[in-house]
Image (tube, rainbow, N blue to C red):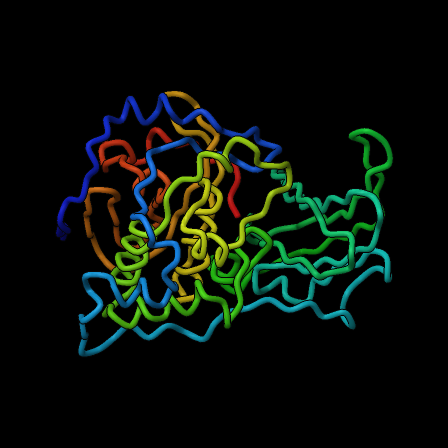
Amino acid sequence: MRSTKPIRLLPVLIILLLLCLTGCGKEDSAPQAGTPEETLKAGSQEMSQDAKADKSEDSEKKVENPYQAPDLALTKFHSDKAEGDSTASIDLSAADQGYVGVSAVSDQRLKFQVLMDDSTYNYDLKGDGTPCFYPLQCGDGSYRFRIMENVIDSKYAELFSTSCDVTIKDQFQPFIRPSEYVSYGPDDACVKVAQKLASRSEDALGVVHEIYDYVCDNVSYDKEKAKDVKVGYLPDPDETLSSGKGICFDYASLAAAMLRSQGIPTKVIFGYVSPNDLYHAWNMFYTEETGWVTVDYEVTGDDWNRLDLTFAANGADGDFIGDGSNYTDVYCY
């Protein structure tokens, strides 16, 4: 069963949108989306996030049985259970919950590497000892973890490594918690706004609808930022909300933070979008509810669904995102 919501399109041709998407990053750097026209209304950046939520056209909507989000799933570093030493350590105690914690101290650039079968993920790692958290996105299996320190040019030496056979409680665990790429906490603005939006919905799809509309209405593409994104850039969802601007990585991280905080499993995907093979970031979320179609994305029941807020917020219609056949997933976080 499918239904539709009102069409809200900006008069932008898809081919023109693709021609202006010129700031894409390389695979080993922070992805830089294109430069769609900014749509944020003047003055909205000064408005508080709660005020924006209250000001939306559905702000007075009341639901008889509002959506009830599960308890917030968070991450924690257990130093007493970590393997290694004070220089480099890895906490595997929460591997069954879909993540690992890492802590390292070095004046040199650090990398954290996750290997499982044919998949390899390389992350920039903080060197001040601050615990960092990474998803076990490859599911059950035998993992190898390595903390690497830069020694010269692009060469790295291993500081510490360990292996672990992982059995995750369920496939959603890595995608309902914060991580380095999707950073948030219980007191963050993005979580509070998501809670307010969720209170207007009766089910998970309604929450997706509210958050989707909110981000589309309040965040526009930052052309200047896209020109000068540094390698290792990590988004701050609250900063994206506050500034009302961002690149594709910011859109994807913000959407994931808001949806995950409401118990909706959400992935951040890096990959390519044809026909121009743009290196790009977008989301996929999971819902058990059955079909729901909008002009910008299609939702099917009991499956992962693609959500590209960068394009949707800046003028691309559902024909562009379509069935996802023009998207090539490369990395998942």
Q: Residue at x 44, y 34 (%)?
A: 223
Relative to 134, say whether 54 is above or below.
below
Q: How many marks?
A: 0
Q: Report the side of 293 relative to 287 (left or right).
A: left
Q: Is residue 46 left or right of residue 181?
A: left
Horizontal side of 257 relative to 133 (left or right) equals left
Which quadrant would residue 200 be assigned to in this image?
A: bottom left
Residue at x-position 19% and y-position 42%: 295
The residue lying at 40 percent from left, 51 percent from top is 244
Q: Which quadrant of the figure has residue 57?
A: bottom left
Residues 39 and 47: in front is 47
Query: Could you tell me residue 221's position as x and y percent?
Result: 40, 40
Q: Residue furthest bottom?
A: 64
The reply, left or right, for residue 182 in relation to residue 48 is: right
- In the rendered image of this protein, does residue 51 appear above or below residue 153? below
Q: Residue at x 60, y 59 (%)?
A: 99
Percent across and percent down for residue 60 are 18, 71
Residue 52 in percent (x, y) is at 31, 62
Q: Which sits in the foreground, 178 or 25?
A: 25
The location of residue 56, given as percent across then percent down, is: 24, 61
